[in-house]
Image (spheres, grey):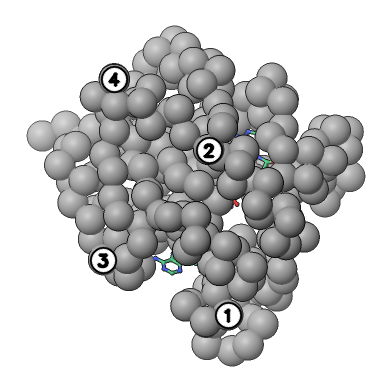
Amino acid sequence: MSKRNLNLIFLGPPGAGKGTQAKMIVDKYSIPQLSTGDLMRAAVSSGSSIGDEVKGYMASGALVPDALVVDILLDRLSGDDCRDGFILDGFPRTVAQAESLEKALVSRGMPLSGVVAMIVPDEALLGRLTARRICRGCSASYHLEFLKPKVDGVCDRCQGELYQRKDDSEEVILNRLKVYHDQTSPLIDFYQKQKKLYTVDGNNKIEMIFSEICDIIDSLN
Ligand code: ADP
Ligand code: ADP
Ligand code: ZN
């Protein structure tokens, strides 16, 4: 039986658990996670001209302009490691991004397998994000209460140092949630119409959500 590519999108508000679940899927299915947030944070810390362009938007919780982020993502998607599949984490975030992505995937012969949307109420997201900690080495997410590292301040996966993202402050989180509802949530309808959408209850235990996502992925093959 020929193996089908797994070309996936993880959709959901900030703090829904996209990154957490994507890391677990990477380990199980050996496809890379492409996080536009991680790619742009790397550009900012490298001090590149793209980094300079995007950092103001990111600091306020606004979206980075479509043209910039589409370029960065499509470039990364050309990597050899994406040939058997990929998980897009945090992209697309606007209908315009979704349309650019669709064109590129069609022209590259990489059709989308499915879109996993994680549904979590706003009330739960604020508490998740204000106590989130991120690894400097591998960008894994932890939580001071819900997902503690074995050793305080140290990543279980790579022993990297954990830090708090500046945009995980209450004021910026509230703006990111508004931006999500205004500009990103229309993608739920967009992918529903294409019959690509699979929803999971993201307000649940991490392992439970993981097992639901694995069932969805296995049903695609
Ligand atoms: P996203 O990538 O969607 O922004 P993350 O995966 O970084 O979200 O998760 C946001 C925060 O919530 C992190 O601190 C993470 O440890 C925590 N978290 C992730 N999934 C759950 C869950 N199912 N229940 C409780 N906390 C979670
Ligand atoms: P979260 O983990 O909270 O979902 P991300 O790391 O995905 O956050 O994104 C952080 C910031 O990077 C966003 O607030 C936004 O400024 C920018 N960003 C990330 N992905 C995109 C995208 N696809 N389009 C526009 N801006 C983006
Ligand atoms: Zn790490």
Q: Residues within 10 Å of mark 4 (few under 14, many from 20)?
A: few
Q: CA distance from mark 4 to mark 3?
A: 27 Å
Expressed as whole percent of the image width and height from the top left, the position of residue 80 reads 50, 33
Mark with earlier residue (1, 4)? 1
Kindly identify which residue carries mark 3. 208
Q: Could you tell me which secondary element the residue under label 4 belongs to?
A: loop
Expressed as whole percent of the image width and height from the top left, the position of residue 185 reads 47, 34
Q: Could you tell me which secondary element the residue under label 1 belongs to?
A: loop
Quick check: is the Cβ at mark 3 less than 8 Å away from ligand 1?
yes
Kindly identify which residue carries mark 1. 144
Mark with earlier residue (4, 3)? 4
Query: In the picture, which quadrant includes the N terminus?
Result: top left
Q: Amino acid at mark 1?
A: Leu
Q: Amino acid at mark 3?
A: Met
Query: Residue drawn at (68%, 74%), measured in percent from left and top?
Result: 162
Mark with earlier residue (4, 2)? 2
Quick check: is the Cβ at mark 1 less than 8 Å away from ligand 1?
yes
* Left or right position of 110 against 178: left
Query: Residue drawn at (64%, 68%), measured in percent from left and top?
Result: 130
* Left or right position of 22 against 35: left
Q: Amino acid at mark 2?
A: His
Q: CA distance from mark 1 to mark 4?
A: 38 Å
